[in-house]
Amino acid sequence: MSDVTATPASAAAGSAASPNGEILRIEELVKHFPIRKGLLKRTVGQVHAVDGIDLEVRQGETLGLVGESGCGKSTLARTILKLIEPTSGKIVVNGNDITGLKRRQMREYRRQLQIVFQDPYASLNPRLTVRNIVAEPLKIHGIARGKQEQVRRVDELLQTVGLSPEHANRFPHEFSGGQRQRIGVARALALNPQLLILDEPVSALDVSIRAQVINLLESLQREFGLTYIFVAHDLSIVRHVSDRVAVMYLGKIVEIGTRDDVYQRSTHPYTQALLSAVPIESPYQRGKRKRIVLEGDVPNPANPPSGCRFRTRCWKAQQICAEVEPPLEDRGFGHRSACHFAEVLNPFELTEAAAAQVDVPTVDTDVVSG
Amino acid sequence: MPEPVLSIKDLTVEFQTEDGVVHAVEGLSYDLFPGETLGVVGESGSGKSVSMLSILGLIPQGRIVRGEASYKGKSLMKMKRSELRKLRGGELSMIFQDPMTSLNPVLTIGFQIDEALAAHNPGISNSESRTRGIGLLALVGVPNPDQRYDQYPHEFSGGMRQRAMIAMAMANNPTVLIADEPTTALDVTIQAQIIEVLKTAQRETHAATILITHDLGLVAELCDRVVVMYAGRAVETGDVHTIFESPRHPYTIGLMESLPVLTVAEDWLRPIPGQPPSLISPPPGCAFHPRCSLSNGRSLCRTSIPELQETGQPEHLSRCHYFQELEGYKSRLAAETAA
């Protein structure tokens, strides 16, 4: 991390970290996408992709962001980087409000916040060599001046992600999915960022390759003291990588806490249903636990339900859920969830007797007998 | 031993491409018995889907070089196209991964179910077909089936489309149901719903099922027996409990070791090193040897392709020269997840 010639602006931004190690805070963040119709493109509605999110991320941690497709997790990730302009709310990086900054002013912060995209086939320019792809951020930010310095830095970055400098002159199509994702990581690391947003970084990869990339990300985090926001729908991977986990549903955080809070002591029915839905890789688990099966689909984010957004699929829903939106309430030590009827339940220990007690709609995880 | 309903022997499939011949499936053999669920597991390019599609005559670009596939003792290879067409969607029925691309967007769901029914039940009346179609939709849990019957695929959500696909696959009381990654495109809470619908389909039709997937969780939950494929070959086959508890092939073991498990907080994952091989010029000898932790550079692995050998556990086969060295190995999935 020695060769970055810090400009005064970025030095100032870097030094302003909050005392509690918070490097990113977002307040009441909202992103609505207009729905336009007709010849005049009149706005006829809004998709509530991200709808009032508060979040803080601390130095060196991994925050997992989980939820199903359409819950707004990727929109949130991109809005934090201002790749998408927020509709309202506040984004604070190292104590500086970056919400209103223009493109040019954002550059200083882009150096600190980088992103690795999901699809390593679509996120690398097929007409650039790997060297040019990884060097691009260095050029844009005027770091690593001189051809020689640039070559050295790119070689170093490729080695950091487990590729060899000989790979630098090849094109993306010559690489496998796992190797391409390494190139994407090298590019994101080029500017020595503090915070990396990893948007489904392994979901496009084969099972046997995923563990390689996850281990790489974890060792890079230790080596460079990186902070991660890890966006994913795979709950096993999120458990493995995260220190804290936020669960999103229809544009809102419904539960947030430490990994163990969320995976072992979850209090929100949606978190519980989500965890219970994953098939576990052991035939010995068959029949030992019950599975919570939710009815129906995720509602349309252009027209979310009143009150609690999860109520249309929730087995606990009552009158109050339609009338009053439940706030994110503390259930102890920063473990928060938004439910009027929050109750601890470990879905992995949901035996028949336990399910009957809490009155959860379940099915067996048994096989059909021939 | 009952007679298998579907039997594949020494199936070998190739594709001619600009870069050379792709050896997609190499000498694959397995049997499917009545009423059972067989899991075919492998990563992309392992040949798990191609092997099924090829025996149903659904890969015009590919070439079956050798091998045999028979349904209830009758050769599928020697069958006339018209006979095969009668079986497909009738007694041999498929559920595909992506319901968005396998439904016709300009025809109503009802029309498409009716098509499946009419093709195999000549002379079925319109009203009878409609009644049965609506009944099928109800069976797979589509709400308001009599209205949904007249809607188009775009009016269905992903999960509902997959339900409709399963309804279609069930329409003609199949004896064999082939489900190719039936839940991969779906969200986890919807996947849980579809797993239930698949169980319903099995219960109602008593069909033997082949589940093609890369998801070991799905296999652990749904299957009786497992075939693990790597680079076009079956590398290990056996009973689901045996495979998950005492696997005897280094690839199967590698897959199980590399997985993060939902119920366990691991410190570190143990990946399989390297990349899946090229199917145009696969490594000599055992295709897995360059990534294998057991081979240790031994020359036999590089020079000779191992046969599927009996491991000593009932009905359990492993394609590894040195599987005996794995004697006593217990998978972490058997132990850790039980907690």
Image (tube, rainbow, N blue to C red):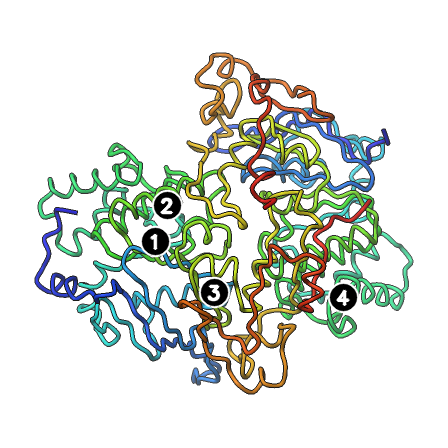
Seen at 70% across and 62% down, the residue is: A362
Whole-number angstrom distance, CA of label 4 to CA of label 3? 37 Å
Dot 1 alpha-carbon crowd within 10 angstroms: few under 14, some 14 to 19, many 20 or more: many
x, y percent for residue B304: 54, 14
Which mark is first along the chain, 2 or 1? 1
For label 3, the residue is: A247
For label 1, the residue is: A116
> In the image, what residue type sits under mark 1?
Val
Seen at 65% across and 39% down, the residue is: B59
> In the image, what residue type sits under mark 3?
Val
Whole-number angstrom distance, CA of label 4 to CA of label 2? 43 Å
Q: Are marks 1 and 2 in contact (CB under 8 Å)?
A: yes
Circle 1: element type: strand
* Residue located farthest toward the bottom when viewing the structure as drawn: A323
x, y percent for residue B324: 59, 18
Please state the chain letter of the residue tagged with numbered disc 4 in the rendered image. B
Circle 4: element type: helix
Eyeballing the image, is A330 above or below B330? below
Foreground residue among A19 and A162: A19
**Left or right of A66, for residue B48:** right
For label 2, the residue is: A181
> In the image, what residue type sits under mark 4?
Gly
Eyeballing the image, is A355 above or below B85? below
In this rendering, do the residues under marks 4 and 3 share a single chain?
A: no
